Image (cartoon, rainbow, N blue to C red):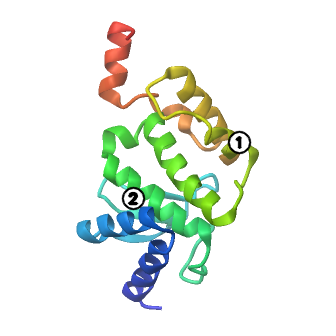
Amino acid sequence: MEHSIWLENLFAAVETVGEEGNAAVNFLRTRRTKVGFKHVRPSVGAFWTVFGNIRLNSYYYSYNTPLEDVRIKTLIVHEARHLQQGIVTALSVYGELDAWQLEFSIYHRLMGKYPHPAIAELMKLPLEYNRDVLRNGARLMQDYAGKEYRIDLLPLYPLGREIRYWLTRK
């Protein structure tokens, strides 16, 4: 299948998840975001790049993946959220918690359940600048994705806020 046709079909599928899907697709189209595939470690479903692109893990996804697949659609919304956040927020536990909660709120609405008990717990966490909450969120992400999911390498807060915390303890 030609890539541009596949991408338009993918975007049309993402739009079917509701308001969040429409907003993500509008953002990605406006930015002319490139979406493709790359084989990476199994703990990653998809990722964004510093060049503003999105890559789906070819370990799980290909041009042959049915576009009705809920995970491919919610992953696109998740990665679009990171691009909207900007690199500083996206590279923090806070940014990940935001994107995970967006992704799995859609998943739950469409599927009627969460894919794992750790996700159900993650969804109960408030999205706030609270170090204990963010540590718990990181633990739950690894409970779901595995220890190879290196959320533990990210600062809890976006970098500027993290530095401020370490200087002032506030």
Could you say where residue 166 lies in the image, as x and y percent from the top left? 38, 13
Report the quarter where the C terminus lies: top left
Q: Nearer the viewer, residue 40 or 117?
A: 117
Outermost residue to the right: 117
Q: Secondary structure at mark 1?
A: helix
Q: Residue at x 55, y 32 (%)?
A: 152
The quarter of the picture where residue 108 lies is bottom right
Residue 59 is labelled as none
Q: Nearer the viewer, residue 3 or 119?
A: 119
Q: Residue at x 51, y 66 (%)?
A: 56
Q: Secondary structure at mark 2?
A: helix
Answer whether labels 2 and 1 touch (C-beta < 8 Å). Answer: no
Name the residue that disc number 2 marks.
Answer: 80
Few, some or many C-alpha atoms within 10 Å of disc 1 (few <14, some 14-19, many ≥20)? some
Q: Looking at the image, is mark 2 or mark 1 earlier in the sequence? A: 2
Could you say where residue 96 lies in the image, as x and y percent from the top left? 48, 42
Outermost residue to the top: 168
Few, some or many C-alpha atoms within 10 Å of disc 2 (few <14, some 14-19, many ≥20)? many
Could you say where residue 75 lies in the image, as x and y percent from the top left? 52, 61
Q: Is residue 161 above or below residue 61?
A: above
Q: Residue at x 71, y 57 (%)?
A: 113
Outermost residue to the bottom: 1
Q: Residue at x 63, y 39 (%)?
A: 122
Question: Distance between the Cα atoms at labels 2 and 1?
Answer: 23 Å
Lateral position of residue 87 relative to residue 112, left or right: left
Q: How many marks?
A: 2
Please state which amino acid type lies under the numbered disc 2.
Ala
Name the residue that disc number 1 marks.
Answer: 118
Q: Nearer the viewer, residue 87 or 29?
A: 29
Could you say where residue 134 lies in the image, as x and y percent from the top left? 53, 29
Q: Is residue 47 visible?
A: no
